[in-house]
Image (cartoon, helix red, strand yellow):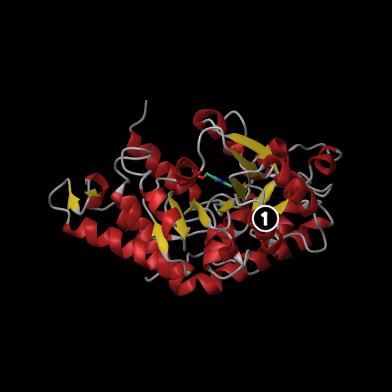
Amino acid sequence: MRNVIEIVRDADRYRSSVINLQASENAVSPNVIRAIGSDFASRYSHIENGVNDYGGTRFAEELEDTVSRKTSELFGLKHAEVRPLSGHIAAMTVLAALVRRGESVMKIPESVGGYTGYSGNYLPKMMNFKSYDIPVTADGFVDYDGLAKQAEYIRPKMILLGQSIFVKSYDMARIREVCDQNSCIIGYDASHVMGLIAGGEFQKDLKKADIIFGSTHKTFFGPQGGLILTDDDDLYRRVEENITWKTMDNYNIARMAGVGVAIEEMMKYGREYAPRVIRNARNLAKALDEHIHIKYGPWYTESHQILMEPGWLSSHGYDFVRFSRVMEDNGIIVDRIGRIGTAEITRMGVDDVDELAAMMIDAFKGVDVKDRVNKFVRNMKMRYYES
Ligand SMILES: *Cc1c(COP(=O)(O)O)cnc(C)c1O
């Protein structure tokens, strides 16, 4: 068996030699790496009723306060909870705080990209709440009239928006109306699109949601983590009561420091980054579509993701797994559920996706493009951080 540090070194070397198009991932800056590798990595700090249970925490306390305030400022929301260890833990904390046993939520069906954790066997089963699918139209988007009708019947405590396959934002005004009529809360899981939203893109009227939460590492610039955001004092208080010794004890202070650095990077560069991510996604879709069919042409996407169609792929002898393997053999990394994402390449300085599309098309046809990929990778350079 090899030493772990050798595996780590090889993984670093490998990942810096390939093009990453996975929609759930991003690259972190050297400053974020510095923060997550700091002394904070093995410290504790919790404040209960104004007193810290640990000593030596003056900088940890300053850190938590600073990161939380800067997060609020970045998103323009009054309260920001930055301790959740991941998007899933953030979701769990919100659900534990706001949905009681036996109550119902309505969520986006998994079949159109809704988050698996909200389906029956996962969080609902563990936490004893009921989970119903929001009706969708034939093309896979929310059926607002259907939702209005079903909500009257189901009387959900929460309408839980957000999805893992996510190319179109919602009509928040319609959903707000439904929730106002049925006194429910709108929860918005922004895991995939947090970095786009921080940069002023995608769901522009997000504030019509009551509570927003999600991951810090998909389109956002951070290490893996979660955020919870709200303007509502009461919802925030209830969330706060469900953290320490409930969904978490320590919150990986060094991770939070990394998130804090990412927040600062977003404050400075988010408005440059987010529109470029979306433009890259659309341009890539356009360039691929004639040879590798991409869904929802001619608009394709409002986000960082573009989607392939399993039916079209199988008529060309591929499924998502084989497509991913063929790309991977050439140094191009895509997931195995048909998404192609442009967050990381955009962060790595790519503004022109024509050669990337050409390499993917050639690889798809069986041509070896490894040398071209190497050349492409050598020209990538991280941006949007203080060097
Ligand atoms: C990725 C994802 C999560 C889980 O996020 P983690 O940070 O991996 O825990 C939750 N909800 C949605 C919609 C996601 O896409």
Kind of element beneath mark 1: helix
**What residue is shown at x 78% (from left), y 38% (from top)?**
318
Residue 109's quadrant in the figure? top right
Name the residue at 58% across, 45% down: 157
Type of residue at label 1? Gln
Which quadrant would the N terminus be assigned to in this image?
A: top left
Residue occupying the point 29% across, 62% down:
65
Q: Is residue 229 left or right of residue 44?
A: right
The residue at which mark 1 appears reads as 181
Q: Ligand 1 is found in which quarter of the picture?
A: top right
Q: Quadrant of residue 177?
A: bottom right
Counting from the top left corner in percent of width and height, residue 346 is at 57, 64
Would the CB of label 1 be found within 8 Å of ligand 1? no
Report the residue at 77% width, 62% height from top.
Answer: 287
Residue 41 in the image, given as x and y percentages of width and height: 26, 47
The answer to whether residue 348 of the structure is visible from this angle is no
- Farthest right residue in view: 315
| 42 and 29: which is toward the camera | 42
